Amino acid sequence: MKTIALSALTAALLAAVVPASYANDSKPTLVHDSEYVIDGRVYGLPEAKVYREDYNGPAVVGEYLTAVPHLAKLDYVGNKTHDVRVDVFSQQVEVAPGVSYSAWTFGGTVPGPVLHVREGDRVVFKMKNRSDKEVVITEPVKDGAPFFSQLQANLYQNNKPVVNPMPHSMDFHSGTVAAEDKWRTISPGETIEFEWIANYPGTYMYHCGTSSVLMHTAMGQYGAVVVSPKDGYPTDDDVDHEYVLVQSEHYLEETNGQYIYNHSAALARDPSHVTFNGHVGALSDTPLRANEGDRVRLHVLNAGPSGTSSFHVIGAIFDRVWYEGDPRNEWYGMQTVLLGASNSATMDFIVPEEGVYKLVDHEFADAERGAAGALIAGPRKD
């Protein structure tokens, strides 16, 4: 009887502290008849839908969509279905003081909104091609994502609506689906709707997959999805601050007082600017914040479209690095993390002292083109 009682007590305690969806023997929830499971991951999602709708509401909808460098807190247990909308349209954006261009955007910024989900979550995604309409993102928005309030508190890109009708698409690297179906191109006025499952943890790029992919990406159509591991990272309880950083190249030339995209420069991999979070001053004018002794976590994505990044924090060493954000890809004590185009890493470091810590691409030609920022550390707190 004692053995039976102990086993029952152990099972009850485990049930109390381990969410059912995290248990080793748990099975994913299947929603559609076409779905099936291999190694605990869901595949076989239904065909995408393309239609026209009379929608002119918030261009970014979803409670876990934020503006860089912010990352939404996952305040739910287990897995969740996320209803997400990120519409595509053009905006005049600034990448450096006095340098603005007519960008093609997801949600109105370069990079686009950050989506945070958990491994095993389902995303029901909608995107309307509103490139033939002016879309304002600098005014208060009802029922929109946290993205808007964060953006409006720091309008460093000086966003202004412009019209530039163009076919576009959405390619989530975080999704495992038939690309010719879900990532299909839609025309101005059309909406695409599809689902994907966050089968693998990590930090992933999304971008427009319409030809020329180089041009569409360089024009500003990219962003990050952070898929947190279902069992977390080993240092989760010790992290004091968590940020998202997206590095990217811009290929602009001045013509008659205006800046336009230079495709020849993009083919030659000769950027005019290389930025963190879309602007040479994004992390300098508004630096990241922490305190002496804090553990800071960075989710760093190199969106390219073509260059590499040698990411480094001057004065710190990365205590833990999970390449591509997968907890199985763990490195220790790294000075610099090399990221190819669309590669990412989740990096922890301890802030050793009060002061200023420069964030740079250690490929210094890129740093001088703008790939630099800072984290300012205040005094140690108990």
Image: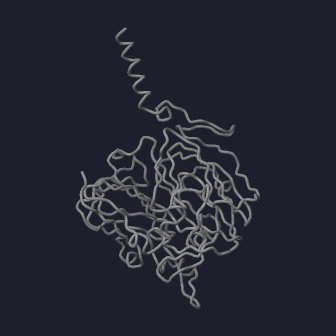
Measuring from the top left, give residue 353's x and y in whole percent. 23, 61
Corner quadrant of residue 276? bottom left
Q: Residue at x 34, y 68 (%)?
A: 374
State the residue at coordinates (29%, 55%). Answer: 294
Return the residue nearer the eye: 66 or 138. 138
Residue 170 in view here: no
Residue 29 falls in image quadrant: top right
Q: Residue 96 at what x, y percent from top left?
A: 47, 79
Q: Can you say whether 328 is above or below 145 in the image?
A: above
Please name the residue shown 73% across and 67% down the image.
188
Q: How is the image coloured?
A: one colour
Q: Is 240 placed left or right of 263 in the picture?
A: left
Q: Residue furthest top?
A: 1
| Above-or-below relation of 310 to 86 | below
Residue 124, position as x, y percentages in the image = 63, 48
Question: What is the x, y in percent for residue 181?
Answer: 68, 54
Query: In the picture provided, is 82 more to the left or to the right than 230?
Result: right
